[in-house]
Image (cartoon, helix red, strand yellow):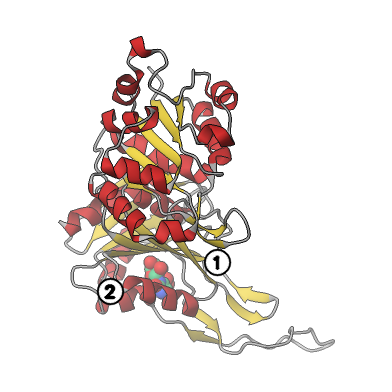
Amino acid sequence: MDKPKVVLGVSGGIAAYKACELLRRLTESGHDVRVVPTASALNFVGEATWSALSGNPVSAEVWETVHEVPHVRIGQTADLVVVAPATADMLAKAAHGLADDLLTNTLLTARCPVVFAPAMHTEMWEHPATQENVATLRRRGALVIEPAVGRLTGVDTGKGRLPDPGEIFEVCRHVLARGTVSAEPDLSGRHVVISAGGTREPLDPVRFLGNRSSGKQGYALARTAVARGARVTLVAANTGLPDPAGVDVVPVGTAVQLREAVLKAAADADAVVMAAAVADFRPARYATGKIKKKEGLEPEPVGLVRNPDVLAEISVDRARPGQVVVGFAAETDDVLANGRAKLARKGCDLLVVNEVGERKTFGSEENEAVVLGADGTEEAVPYGPKETLANVVWDLVSRRFR
Ligand code: CTP
């Protein structure tokens, strides 16, 4: 089988150096990558680097190897075009269909999915001109990843960082996997909120009641949603996982903090997926000093109080009409019967039920589940990567949008 053909467009920003890492990930995972830098990008990283890492010739202009008509052929034959970093200037040119170099020509001739990973200073990103260009590109079906928040070149920090190259690679992988089915991102224009991880309920400054949720299923939901065009808010409880590209990550600790963050983000959300393992109880008393053992005395029992049930709350009291709410349930016995009862009790639209066991669910890369619908439907997802289950969830959610 031919290797998938990827065009890596690089425009002139300092983050161009990070595109070298993206290039490595793409080539090492079996993609045939053609790097098309702009002339400005070559000021940051030279042709020799791109050529050596890709194993392919590199040119920025349309005037080289003219007999091969590269300005048309490179775009026409690509399975995916990813522009990383995409500068404000590049987004403007792409939005307006300018074609004054090889990369902009390639963008006009490509008929495959196109991903832009913007990187620029916060002011440039927030400028109405840039925002309108981004909206134009998204309307036309391109996937424009939200920049990350953090340290920018120089002393300033804010939104505008290029996301981690490994995470941009994940977006490319997901888009390529779906590209054959549909090039149009089906969650485009939708805001989805996902909770992930496990809450920790503090007993004292050093101890907590927690659970074994790793957050991997929630992160798979976030990555696949970005690749399908959604704006994603990820409420992450104690996961320690790298931020997925293009995702607004809201870190939380306890169930009460998670509830606050989910309710806030859900206000304008089209869907809320509660993949987090939320503690049902928290210690009734928090000791402000470390609880010490006392010689000769039995430890004091830990009193518990109920935490709010976030899933039940957002299901009953929908922030928007038509908002789709999805819950998760990990069960050990009578899996389906318990799942059906829980779906009815919580009042959500879909409930992903998985059996807790060896290799399955906690900390694992794989999962197996049945997705129950409030309308009586049942969809079994066989044992496989957590992202497969994530895509089934989004298929069922997007069907409910329609
Ligand atoms: N959940 C929640 N708030 C809680 C507890 C759970 O929002 N305080 C959500 C989880 O995110 C998950 C779903 O509810 O989507 C399933 O939670 P689970 O604890 O398994 O359900 P319970 O009704 O507590 O049932 P059980 O008796 O099995 O504990």
SS class, disc 2: helix
- On screen, residue 302 versus residue 355, left or right, reads right
Q: Are marks 1 and 2 in contact (CB under 8 Å)?
A: no
Reply above or below: 82 against 280: above
Label 1, residues with CA under 10 Å away: few <14, some 14-19, many ≥20: some
| Residue 388 in view | no
Q: Earlier in the sequence, mark 1 or mark 2?
A: 1
**Amino acid type of the residue tagged 1 in the rendering:** Asn
Q: Secondary structure at mark 1?
A: loop
Residue in front for this viewpoint, 287 or 142: 142
Disc 1 marks which residue?
Answer: 211
Residue at 19 percent of width and 58 percent of height: 400
Q: Can you tell me whether the CB of the residue at mark 1 lies under 8 Å from the nearest atom of ligand 1?
A: no
Spatial CA span between label 1 and label 2: 24 Å
Residue 146 in sight from this viewpoint: yes
Picture quadrant of residue 6: top left
Task: Provide the residue designation for mark 2.
Answer: 315
Q: Amino acid at mark 2?
A: Ser
Residue for point 18% across, 60% down:
376
Q: Residues within 10 Å of mark 2 (few under 14, many from 20)?
A: some
Pick the front one: 345 or 396: 396
Which mark lies nearer to you, 1 or 2?
Answer: 2
Image location (x, y in percent) of residue 213: 52, 61
Residue 366's spot in the image, x, y percent? 46, 45
Q: Quadrant of the N terminus?
A: top left
User: Ligand 1: which quarter?
Assistant: bottom left
